[in-house]
Image (cartoon, grey):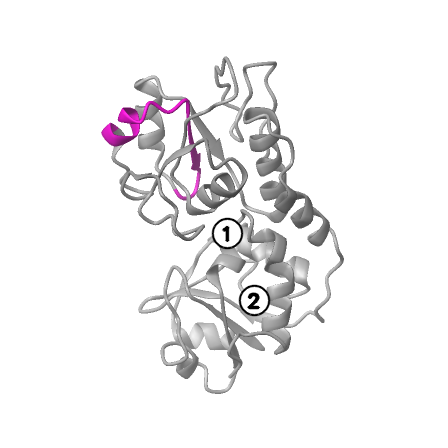
Amino acid sequence: MTGRSGHAGRPADDLGTVLELPRPPRRVVSLVPSLTEALAVSVPDRLVGATDWCTHPAGLDVVRVRGTKNPDRAAIEALRPDLVVVNQEENRKLDVERLRAAGVPVWVTVIESVEQALASMGRLFGEVLDVGTPDWLATATREWARPPELPGTRVAVPVWRDPWMVVGARTFTGDLLGRLGLVNVFGASADRYPRVELPELHAAGPELVLLPDEPYVFTAGDGPEAFPDTATVLVSGRQLTWYGPSLATARADLLAAVTGTGQGAVT
């Protein structure tokens, strides 16, 4: 769902909420790691606050405002931001409503596909921040316009264990997999991140299991042993789930990992 544009000084976010912005924001707080990296790389002088979970780029030196689900609203307000950037999936509606009630403009992104990610980032930087298209976004747009390159391999992507949870329908990660040519065996599930028992995961018939390092940190000693008869690959969760500058290199990195030509551990 891509938002609609307002007129000059009144852009609409991805949910269609119109913001009153008399000038391009100069003090921005991000409550999403992907968005934080995008802002820090593209407009470093404007980013003044981020969550404790915002780990990229390395050495980021801004005020920390707690987590994505429990942001310190008082600390955010104290930073006097003229924009707070959030995501519908990662942040709480309650926090958005209370920040807006305190007079803080909040821009909500909705990203469930690669196309939405590229369009949403384009609007944020082009229409709201008024800095045009960052180089990484232009590169990502070209990379993800390429046709699928993998042969329809059936994959499963666990994101948690005990209980096991996997990538399901209507997700950014699922769309990204499809654009590589992979087939998500849980792509037709009713839930976006269904909980499954391990036998059910096996019964779905994946030919390959991708094990990311976030949100659950799968490692060579924690994850592959659950799939003794199925090939597994350890991959970067950032390449699978982040929609900032990592999108510029994610395609090549994931293709290399899946085909065994990169650094991903294939077992």
Give the number of callouts: 2
Instruction: Name the foreground residue: 203 vs 139.
Output: 139
- The residue sitting at 49% across, 38% down in the picture is 39
Horizontal placement of 99 versus 21: left or right?
A: left
- Give whichever of 34, 89 is nearer the camera: 34
- Residue drawn at the location 38% of the way across and 48% of the way down: 54
Q: Is residue 196 highlighted in magenta?
A: no
Q: Is residue 12 left or right of residue 62?
A: right
Q: Residue at x 65, y 49 (%)?
A: 140
Amino acid type shown at disc 1: Trp
Counting from the top left corner in percent of width and height, residue 250 is at 59, 59
Question: What mark, if any, has residue 169 been given in the picture?
Answer: none
Say if mark 1 contacts mark 2, CB within 8 Å. Answer: no
Horizontal and vertical percent position of residue 86:
42, 36
Q: In the image, which residues are magenta?
A: 74-90
Q: Magenta span has 83?
A: yes
- Asked if residue 193 is positioned above or below residue 4 in the image, the reply reads below
Instruction: Classify 55 as above or below 231.
Output: above
Q: Quadrant of the N terminus?
A: top right
Percent across and percent down for residue 260 are 61, 78
- Please, which residue is most extreme toward the right here? 147
Q: Measured along the vertical axis of the image, is residue 209 above or below residue 167?
A: below
- Residue 30 lies in what quarter of the image? top left
**Residue 103 location, quadrant:** top left
- The secondary structure type at the circle numbered 1 is loop
> For mark 1, what is the residue?
242
Q: Can residue 240 be seen from the camera position used here? A: yes
Q: Which residue is mark 2?
A: 185
Q: CA distance from mark 1 to mark 2?
A: 21 Å
- Give, as a three-letter code, the residue at label 2: Val
Mark nearest the camera among 1 and 2 is 1
Task: Name which of mark 1 and mark 2 comes first in the sequence.
Answer: 2
